[in-house]
Image (cartoon, rainbow, N blue to C red):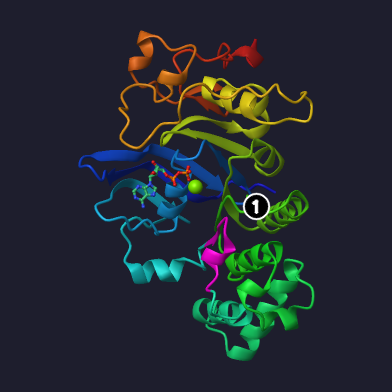
Amino acid sequence: MTGTETVLAIEDLTVDLPLSGGGRFRALDRVNLQVRRGEILGLVGESGSGKSMLSLAVLGLTGIAGERITGRIALLGEDVLGLSPSAWRRLRGSAVGMVFQDPMTGLNPVRSIGSLLVESVRRHQRLDRATSKTVALDALRSVGIPSPEARMKAYPHQLSGGLRQRVMIALALINRPSVIIADEPTTALDATIQAQILDLLRARLADRAGGILITHDLGVAAEVCQRLAVIYQGTIVEQGQTAEVLAWPYHPYTQGLLDAAPRFDRPRGRLVPIPGQPPQPGDRREGCPFRSRCAHADEACAALPVLAEVAPDHLARCWHPLRAATSPFEDAV
Ligand SMILES: Nc1ncnc2c1ncn2[C@@H]1O[C@H](COP(=O)(O)OP(=O)(O)O)[C@@H](O)[C@H]1O
Ligand SMILES: [Mg+2]
């Protein structure tokens, strides 16, 4: 059930990073996103578009020398940008949990699964060792890990990729955070395991947390995410209900992603790659970021369009949207 409580609010989030050759580039440009309790927001875009930067910012994990971060990030209404490292350590694992693509980077390799889980429960919930162990075993059971007693003694490298990813989800959820950030959590897994892990994330997020699922796979987004945001060169270019954005995209970049995605209902060989190169750090970025690759671009696109409502609860940032905006008065006539 999707509630109305906003668990994560990102407002005008801008991240400027230094370039190795001098100067700066804007990895995120005035990003606005909200996640409600019970909702999974999908974030899609090509590699290098700033998806991981956004997740690291929400977790207080950017830490790049010379970075400049402005805007606002509110977790359960509390401003978290600029918190001290110790304040972040208290929030991570309690208010906000994380699941990464590679569990080997998310799980400490020299700690047994049991000690990772028990330590997290003791730190955040201040329970005694015996109770924490019971909580840890329950967490492993809840993500479908067989013989959890035996698994508690295992080290991350002794588990298969699918089991490791389940452990990371158990760890992310064990202290009942309100927000989960999952950055390409199933990219490294085969299709069957991927479906199981996505089902699990969906079920565990459904009633008490909200989350952002980062993926480059529109099929995954379509299956799991109620709402979808499309990001290009650090700029949100389209946003709305997932089914609607994928069925009636307004932004040529979203259409490009759809045309480039494999689909079962289309014969092989019909994939149309987006022309041109994905943007590189330091590329000029005045006007619409997509204009150098866009078939519809003209002089108007030298200025950045606003992210405007094109239909109810559907936003697009384009001077030449692929279809006429729905009149807000249409239903009233
Ligand atoms: N530690 C870093 N230092 C400098 N630039 C970085 C760093 N991490 C990422 N970037 C740059 O930020 C941009 C966004 O990267 P990222 O968020 O990782 O993209 P995505 O996850 O969408 O593939 C890219 O241009 C990338 O090169
Ligand atoms: Mg990434």
The residue at the far front in this view is 269
Q: Can residue 112 be seen from the camera position used here?
A: yes
Q: Is residue 315 above or below residue 203?
A: above
Q: Is residue 122 above or below residue 198?
A: below
Q: Is residue 267 left or right of residue 273?
A: right
Query: Residue 256 location, x and y as percent?
Result: 57, 23
Q: Is residue 132 left or right of residue 53?
A: right
Identity of the amino acid at label 1? Thr
Q: Can residue 312 be seen from the camera position used here?
A: no
Membership of 158 in magenta stretch: no
Q: Is residue 297 above or below residue 102?
A: above
Question: Which residues, given as a range, are shown in magenta?
Answer: 97-108
Mark 1, other Cα within 10 Å: few <14 / some 14–19 / many ≥20: many
> Total of numbered circles in the picture?
1
Residue at image mark 1: 186
Say which quarter of the image contains residue 281: top left
Residue at 51% in and 21% down:
275
Q: Is residue 224 left or right of residue 107?
A: right
Element class at badge 1: loop
Query: Residue 145 location, x and y as percent?
Result: 75, 70
Q: Is residue 302 above or below residue 155?
A: above
